[in-house]
Image (cartoon, helix red, strand yellow):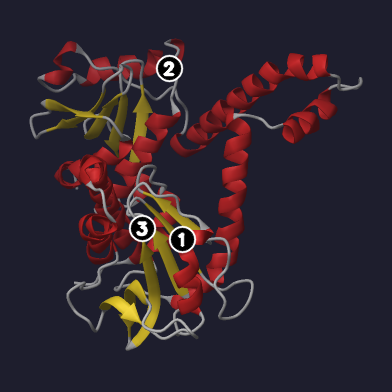
Amino acid sequence: MSVSKGAGAVELGERLASLASKVEQQKPSIQTEEATKNAFVMPFIALVLGYDVFNPQEVVPEFTADVGIKKGEKIDYAVVKDGEVQMLIECKTVGSPLTLSHASQLFRYFATTNARIAILTNGEQYHFFTDLDRPNRMDDKPFLQLDLTDLDPSVFPEVEKMGKEFFDLDSIVSAAEELKYVGALKRVLAAEFREPGDDWMRLLITRVYDGPITQRVREQFGPLVRKASKQFLADQVNERLKAALGTQANGFSPAPEAITGEVAAEESIAEAENSQDRGVVTTLEELEAFQIIRAIGCSEVPASRIVARDTKSYFGVLLDDNNRKPIARLHFNTSQKYLGLLDEEKVETRHPIDTLEEIYHHADEVRTAVRRYV
């Protein structure tokens, strides 16, 4: 059975989340580069990218190519596709920084093979390089970064293109320049929103303040810029939420029977009518979790059929905007977050989660809930 790229990206996200959990659990006991390769990098090549690490026609460990006066130098892995070396992978011990000084072998090998993709990794972070600046010369900066400690679903489709099933070199390279600069800009913006730098601060102050920018003015505006930045991001999240989910007035709260039985339709309708007055606040985490559940469920139904209703007590995910078709409930209002999943009798089981990626561990249950109503 063939797998569409959309469904493939969802499954890839689940595999990445599983590997991320493994890295988190085992990282303290990994002390060497060889252990890093065995525990983390080989599973990434095999489970995430889909190559057979025990087939030298697909993955060549300790790949050797003479480079100038460097004879017999080895690189950790070469990934072969259609009889050609397509990717080179250099590994460092988990926790090691991924700097250019760690990529010297990649630089040399990149120019002497047909590979257009080079990967520098410590088993936790993966930096992907190509030759955008000069043909056959590996760029100084990666065009894509994958961090298992902070998974970004927006990069999943790009990683998917490097996998065995969907390998598409032309698409990877053509998208690389945009990915490189968009990723860099996102990291700059994120840093500025977390802690505004002097240049960013000065730019914003000059747009709202006509007087000279003295030290006293900078000290006065520093907290204001940080506060405005946070409020701006919150406003953007709320606007996107309203656009994606409709109005926040469509909410429902759990009645006492919600944990042990089905909520009466009359009570749900009444709750929905009164939700606008309850001061419901949707958080960024809830929105991100909803998108993960929607991504999982879209293997069964069109994503547009999976919608959300937020309440003070929990964030509900429904099929067809029907409160009789609950898929999941997010209980994020306490220090311990829970993912609530309901069985055929509408009995809810709450699963504690520490990170949003752990939702992928319950993907089969989410899909079962969706299929229940189809």
Q: Is residue 239 left or right of residue 252?
A: right
In this view, the mark in front (2 or 3): 3
The residue beneath circle 2 is 280
- Residue 102: % across, % down: 46, 60
Front position in the image: 321 or 368: 368
Front position in the image: 121 or 317: 121
User: Given the image, on which type of amino acid does mark 2 rest?
Assistant: Val
Could you give the CA–CA distance between mark 2 and mark 1, rounded to whole angstroms?
49 Å
Q: Is residue 117 left or right of residue 234?
A: left
Tag 1, which secondary structure? helix
Tag 3, which secondary structure? loop
The residue beneath circle 3 is 92
Front position in the image: 277 or 151: 151
Residue displayed at 66% across by 30% down: 196
Which disc number belongs to residue 219?
none
Q: Residues within 10 Å of mark 1 (few under 14, many from 20)?
A: some
Front position in the image: 110 or 11: 110
Could you give the CA–CA distance between mark 3 and mark 1, rounded to whole angstroms?
8 Å
Q: Residues within 10 Å of mark 3 (few under 14, many from 20)?
A: many
165 is higher (above) or lower (below) than 268: below
Give the mark nearest the N terminus, 3 or 1: 3
- How many marks the image carries: the answer is 3
The residue beneath circle 1 is 102
User: Given the image, on which type of amino acid does mark 1 rest?
Assistant: His
354 is higher (above) or lower (below) than 53: above
Assess whether mark 1 and mark 3 are in contact (beta carbons under 8 angstroms): yes
Q: Residues within 10 Å of mark 2 (few under 14, many from 20)?
A: some
Tag 2, which secondary structure? loop
